[in-house]
Image (cartoon, helix red, strand yellow):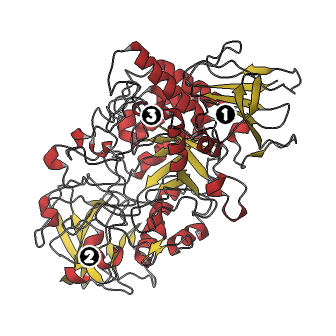
Amino acid sequence: MATSASDEPHPGVKLGADGAAFTVRAPQAHQVWVCLYDDEDRETARLALPAASDGLFSAFVPGLTAGQCYGLRADGPFEPERGHRFDPAKLLVDPFAVRINRPFAWHPDLARFGVDTAHLVPRAVLEPPLPDRASRPPLFVPGCLVYELPVRAFTILHPAIPLSDRGTLRALAHPAVIEHLRSLHVTAVELMPIAAWIDERHLAPLGLTNAWGYNPVTMLALDPRLAPGGVQDLRFAVDALRDAGIGVLVDVVYNHTGESDADGATLSLRGLGNAAYYRHHRDDPGQLVNDTGCGNTLACDRPEVKELALAAMRFLVSEGGVDGFRFDLAPVLGRDQSGFSRDAVLLEALRADPLLADRVFIAEPWDIGPGGYQLGCFKPPWLEWNDQARDDTRRYWRGDASATGGLATRLAGSSDIFSREGARTTRSINFVAAHDGFPLGDLVAFAHKHNQGNGEDNRDGHGENLSWNNGVEGETSDAAILAAREADARALIATLFVTRGTILLTAGDEFGHSQGGNNNAYAQDNAVTWRDWSALNADRLAFTRAMAAVRANSSLLTRTAFLMSADGSASPDQIAWLKVGAAGPEPVDWSDSNLSTLMMLLGAPGSRLSVLFNRGSTAVAPQLPESQGSRGNWLPITPGFDSAAPVPPRSVAIWREA
C-alpha cells in the first residue's frame, strides 16, 4: 500500500488500471481503515489509511479491480455528550460509495456500542465511472406536467413488465410504461427516492417495511432493490425515457439520514464524524437537532455535508443522466445555527456549480424546525411545491364558504406567493394530491384518515385533509355516491390541468388508486401502495388523458406568466372572472361567500379559453360571453362535454374561442 500521490485528495474511491485510491473524510477520527472482502464475503485485508489533512485519510491500494467489495471502520473519541460517537466495532459504508451489494436492514446490534456489525452491513462495491451524460441539457419546461412516481409501487403489478424487472428502475424503460406516460403528455417523471435506505427501527416488530425511501443511508449508491445493477439501471431508464421526450427528476433527501436519533444505527456518517455531519444543539452538543422529525438533521452549512450533497448530485447527473431534483424538506439545505437563509452556503453552491447550475431544482419548501415554512422564499429559478394551491383547490370543491377567491388566486399562478422582488412568472408546482396524504381518489371517499395499519393507533399522518366522503366513509356500493365521487375526482383533475404554473400528478391518481383511507402509507410496501393495473378506473383514465391533451395543446394553459386583469389587449396573460347570472355571464361579486359558479376567461380576445367551474348541486346553462373569434363562436373542448347541454353539477367545462 502506498500513500496517494494527489496533493488535494477528494473523498471517495478513484479506480485506476493498477488499483484504487481511497479517500475518506472523518473529522476528529484518530484512525480509519478500509476492509476488503472476497467473493464469499470474507474479510481479506484491513488496511490503515494514513491521515492527510482536513480530516482526510487517504491511500492507494494496488491490484484492486472493479467489483471489489469494501467497508470502512473508524476510531476516535466516544463522547456522546460532545457529539462524538466513534466505534471501531462498526463496519461503515463509505458515504461516497457508488454502489452497495445488498440493501440495508435494521438490527438492534447496529445501535449497540462495541458490537461488531460486519455481518449486518452491506459492502460498497468498486465501479469504474460511466461515460459522462452531463452535457445533455435538461428535458424540462416550466408549465409542464410532472408525474410523481414510486418506482416499486408503480411497476410491481404491471402485467406487461417481465417479472425480473418489476419493481425496479429498468421497468420504467418498458414500452407499456412509456406509452402510458406519453398518453398523459408527461414532460418529466419525478422519481421518489432511489438512494439506498433503511427501515425505521419500529417497523420490523410490526411486520412493516419502508415503501417510500425517505430514510436514506447513502446519497450516491442506489438501493439494490430498485437498482440491482447500480447506477447503470438508472441510466438505462433515463435514456429510454429521454428517447420518448420525457425527462427524469429525482427526489433526494439531504436533510437527514436513516441513522436516526441517539438510539439509532451507526452505519456511515455517524461513525465517521457524528459531530460534524449532523446538527447539534448549540448549548448542548450532545443533543441532535430534529428539524426533520426523523431523529437527526444534516448540517448542510458545514463543508463536509455540502461536499457530499454536491458529489451526490453530480453523480446522478453525470452518470445517471438525470435532469434535476426535488428536495425533500428543502429548508434544511438553507439552515445554519441561526435558521434559514435563501442565500445559504449550499443553496448558493448549487447555483454556482458548473455541472448543476442548469438542472431543475424543486423545493418542498417546509420542514418542522423554527421558521420552517418557506413557501415562496427560494430564489429563482427554483420551483416550489405549493401546498396552498393544494388546499385552496380542495376547499373549493369540498364546498367551503368563501373559497372562490382562493381558487382564483391559485388558478392565476399564486402571485401572492411568487411575485416577490418583482417576479413576473410563477414558480409554483401545483398539485391536488401527492405521496404524502390521501391519493386523489381517497380525497372524495374519506373524511378522516384510517392509518391503523401503520401500527401507531391512527396517531400518525395529518389530521386535517380537507377531504370529504360524499355521504359514506370509504367503500360503498351506492351508485349515487359512487357517481358523485367520480364527478368530484374529475373536477379536481380538471382544475389541476387548468391551473397556471407547473402541475404535478401522482402516479395512479389518473386511474383511481386508493390507499383505503391511509394518508401516511410510507410503511405499506404492499397492496395499499402498489398500483393495481388490473383494476384501474378506465373512464377516469380516459378523462385524465383527454384533459392532459387539452392542456398540452393550449399555450394559454402552459404559460407561466402571472395572469392580470383583462384589458382587451393582445396579451395572452390577461384574465376576466365571471359568474353565470340570470341574463348571462356577469362580474364576480367576491363578497358573495357562497358562489357556486366561476368562469375564467383566459387570453386575448379572439383566441380565448373559457373555463366554467360549477361546484353547485344543479346544472348550469352554458352561457358564454360574445365570441370575438374568426367564426364568432365557442367550441367545447372538455372531454365528453356537449356544447348544447347544461354544465353538470360538480364539474368543469372548457370552451375555445373559434
Q: Of label 1 and label 3, which has the lower sequence position?
A: 3
Q: Nearer the viewer, residue 315 or 460?
A: 460
Q: Quadrant of residue 465?
A: top left
Q: Quadrant of the N terminus?
A: bottom left
Tell me: 397 left or right of 557. Answer: left
Q: Quadrant of residue 7?
A: bottom left
Q: Is residue 427 visible?
A: yes
Q: Which residue is mark 1?
A: 552
10 Å neighbourhood of mark 2: few (<14), some, or many (≥20)?
A: some
Secondary structure beneath disc 1? Answer: helix
Q: Position of residue 146 (x, y in %)?
A: 55, 42
Q: Position of residue 148 (x, y in %)?
A: 47, 42
Q: Of label 2 and label 3, which has the lower sequence position?
A: 2
Q: Position of residue 28 (x, y in %)?
A: 29, 84
**Which of labels 2 and 1 is toward the front?**
2
Disc ID at residue 440: 3
Q: Position of residue 510 (x, y in %)?
A: 49, 29
**Which of labels 1 and 3 is toward the front?**
3
Q: Nearer the viewer, residue 498 or 328?
A: 498
Report, in whole angstroms, how far the alpha carbon at label 2 lies from the one at label 1: 51 Å
Q: Of label 2 and label 1, which has the lower sequence position?
A: 2
Task: Tell me: residue 219, above or below residue 89.
Answer: above
Q: Are marks 2 and 3 in contact (CB under 8 Å)?
A: no
Q: Tell me the amino acid under the disc marked 1.
A: Ala
10 Å neighbourhood of mark 1: few (<14), some, or many (≥20)?
A: many
Tell me: 272 left or right of 314. Answer: left
Q: Which residue is mark 2?
A: 287
Residue at screen point 50% across, 49% down = 387
Q: Tell me the amino acid under the disc marked 3.
A: Leu
Tell me: 203 left or right of 167. Answer: left
